[in-house]
Every structure is written in structure tokens, then in C-alpha cells.
Image (cartoon, rainbow, N blue to C red):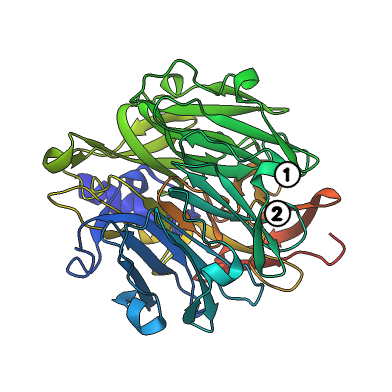
Amino acid sequence: MWSWLAGAAAAVAMVTGVATAADRTPSFAPVQPGLFDAPGALVTAWADYDRDGDADLAVTFKSGEIRLYRNDRGMFANVAGVVGLLRTSEELRAAAWGDYDGDGDPDLYLASKGRKYLYRNDGGRFVEIGRVAGIDAPGSSARQAVWIDQDLDGDLDLFVASRSGPNILFRNEGGRFRDVAAELGLADARRSVGACWFDMDEDGDLDLFVANQDGDTDAMFRSERGRFTDVARSLGMDRAGRAQDEGGVGCAIGDFDNDGRFDLFVAAYGRSLLYRNLGSGRFAEQAVARGIDLTGHHVAAAWADYDHDGQLDLFVTGYTGSGTTAKPDDRLYRNRAGKFENMLAGDHALNAADHGAQWADFDSDGDLDIALAEAYPPNGRHPVLRNEASAAARARALSIQLVDVAGHATRAGAEVRLFDGKGRLLASRPVGAGEGYDAQSALPVHFGLASLAPVRVEVTFLTPRGRVKQQIRGIDPRSYRGRPLVVRQRGNS
């Protein structure tokens, strides 16, 4: 009886383009499991490095290995050695894609406790230039790395959260980098592991949340004319009084209540946190009230509308035990009108990560798949899992690629909002400027849609003149199946 009803519901959805209850049950299947079985994976980072229109995956390991899985029509092959990405002698704890030289393809930053590497992408092959470019900072133990245009001069700068030593902000000065963290107020010596940039007070520049470990308080650095002040304590976001074994780990930015303001989730050792953005740079912690009663060891987080009902869901990685007894302890929280319900049983295929997790539509079928990293023994692996949503659910999607005036994807921190025909806000997404922990993406933003009705797209670019909006009306999502809508920043923005 149920299968008949589900089939009937799916048929109705195909005609009406409206989400059904059957769409919301998470169904994911491993992709090429024999390929993604190496242990000790730490970071997952997606980008289209070869510019062929699909998402490729970089994975780093405790062994110092870097793998680059090239995606060819949904099938992956590790090509790291072929394209010039070399194994190191230390575990790689940070990786981030970004087009720092503005030539149209994403370059790759990698960091260990010792060496730091910048692999310049030259048409799909890589040349390591970290020391020449000035980003090799051997005294820091890098964790999360983020490419952003912090000074709004049109190119990408690099922020690195450090577990030991002060945090670093490398300003891009014509393709060479200079650490300006101390002069801007960001050279924080707390034990930092997670970092997320967003315009939290909507004043036209990027602010920075930093998650800190080992009992340290968290930080919210508000940008004030290019200099930064930590306002976490005044906002009630510092979490003073933590035990020595507690602290923030991963952070993730998303508009979970579709009010147009970006909220903040913090995965933590201890109690994880959900800060709802109240506007005017104010936040209220509402994790338990919203159904996320999460304590223990939780590491990374990533927002995504996995079931395409128009509401952001949340994936959180974590673990129980330690050493050889460590086991993944993950959650997939489905968003039900602002209240969250965990959809994962302990034996679910998605319960397979203790470090990085990042979503991507790698097979261009419309829904979001996920890459996971499990670092701890004995079953460490790094599976990629395909979302097996219904055809109707897959169809209800719209991806949007923001590019600068030259047509390059350097606008991390910009914002995208969708409105219906009556002007009602449907959803908001930030262009990736720090996702989770041990995870990163340089892909287009992805919207799941409750229906296939035309939408108005509003993009907010952060510029020296403040928040500048561009709008495109009458976008039919059906016209962008398998490809993103590209929005170019206007030359006078």
C-alpha cells in the first residue's frame, strides 16, 4: 500500500512540481566504494579544477597524501600525481580552493603543521609556489583556510585559522601575499580551528566568526572600516566558562528560517550551538529550542536543502570514543519550518564521518550529494554518497554562479536571495566563505525549491561602495537543469 501511495505522490509531484513527504526520507548510496576507501581522511574540498562543468574533489590525509579525484561524467579517478599535487611528510589539516590570480581557474592552498603550499592551477596542471608567493608560515598549525576578498579590492585574500600560533590574514598584493592580521586586529593567539566570514551586521563588509578549542572562548570579529574588534562577549557568543576539553570546532553559515538573515551553527566539543540572526548584528542561541540538543565531540557542519522542500537542512559530523574505539556519530537534521529532526539511525550510510563533510551536485542531476572524511581507526575512509532523491525532487533546483566583472568566481561572501512572483522571500544563500571544519567548496550556490514556479534572483555584492544589489526577474528553474545560472557583477558595482 505504501509503495503505491509513494508512487502516486511522486507522479503528482512530477506534474505539479511540489515537494511531497516521500521526497524527504534520506536515501544515499556509496559511489565507487573501492576508490574512496583509504583511511585517515581529514579534509574534503570541491571545485571544478579543470573547468569541464562538473565538481572535482580534493581530499587530504593524516599521512600527508593529497588526492584529487577528477570527475568525468559522474565517475571519479585520482589524478593528483599526474597533475602535479605531491605527497608531503606531514598530515594536511587545511585545504581551500580559490582563484587567487584571477585567471579563471581555482588554485589550491594546502597546510600542514609545518609547510604551507599554494598550488597555482595552470590550465589543469599545478605548480607549487607557496614560498615564492609568501604564504609559507611554518610556525602555525593551520586548520580551516578561507579565501575571501577581505579588503574589497577585487582579488582573493587568504585567512588561516591556527591551532597554535596567531591566526593569519594574507593580503593578496598582485599575486604575492603579506600577513596583515596583526595590523587589522586578527592575529588572535587563541587555539582556533574553525572560521566563517559573512556580513553579520549587513553594513557592507565581511565580518569573521572564529571557533576556538581547548577551553578558549569563541570570537566574533566585527569589521569597522577594515579593522576588526572582537564583539563576541557583548553579543553573548563567546561561551565563557568552558572546561579545558570543550570548545568550538566547525562553523557553518545558513539562513535556516528563510528570513533573509544569515544564521550561524557551531559544532563543538561540549554543547553545539545555533545562533539565530535577529538583525542589526544581534544573535540568539536557540539550538535546543530548535531541536538540536547536541553534546559530545562534534566537528564539522554543512547546510544544504537535501530534500528540496525550500528549507535548509544541516549535516553534522562527530565521533564517540577515542583511538581504536572511535566511531562516527553524525546527524542529518531535517528542517521542518524552523524545527529540526535527526533523520540518521546509527547504521545509516551517512553516519560515516568524524571530520570533514561537504555537499555538491557532482553528477549534475539536480540534488546534492555529499563527501565525508573519517580520520580515526579502525574503519577510516572517505566515502562519496549519491543522493537518490526522486526525479520530481531533483527537478526542483536552481544553482547560481556569481562571477566578478572579469567573469571569474572570486565573490566569496556575496549573497543570493530568491523571491516568488508576489515578492515573498523564498530562501537565501551565501557564496562560500568558510564551511564547517576540514571542508570547503568553490562551487555555485544551490537552492532546493518547494515548487518550479518562476523566481526573481537578487544578488548582493559587497563593494567599496557598500552592499550593491542586482536583480534578475522571471527565472524559470526548468531552463537551468544541469547547469548554473551565471550572474556577472556589473562594472559599476
Name of the residue lying farthest toward the front = 139
In the depicted structure, whether residue 38 falls above or below residue 351: below
Badge 1 density bin: few <14, some 14–19, many ≥20, Cα 10 Å = few
Residue under label 1: 423
- Sequence-earlier tag: 1 or 2: 1
Residue at image coords 52%, 43%: 195
Residue 489, image x and y in percent? Answer: 76, 64
In the depicted structure, whether residue 317 falls above or below residue 367: above
* Circle 1: residue type: Gly
Quadrant containing the C terminus in the rendered view: bottom right
Q: 112 or 369: nearer the eye? A: 112
Q: 29 or 462: nearer the eye? A: 462
Cα distance in 3D space between marks 1 and 2: 8 Å
* Residue 400, quarter of picture: bottom right
* Circle 2: residue type: Arg
Residue at image coords 26%, 60%: 63
Residue 74, image x and y in percent? Answer: 35, 74
**CB-based contact (under 8 Å), mark 1 and mark 2:** yes
**Disc 2 element:** strand
Q: 134 or 294: nearer the eye? A: 134
Residue 367 visible to an observer of this rendering: no
Residue at image coords 34%, 72%: 69
Residue under label 2: 456
Badge 2 density bin: few <14, some 14–19, many ≥20, Cα 10 Å = many
Residue 370, image x and y in percent? Answer: 35, 56
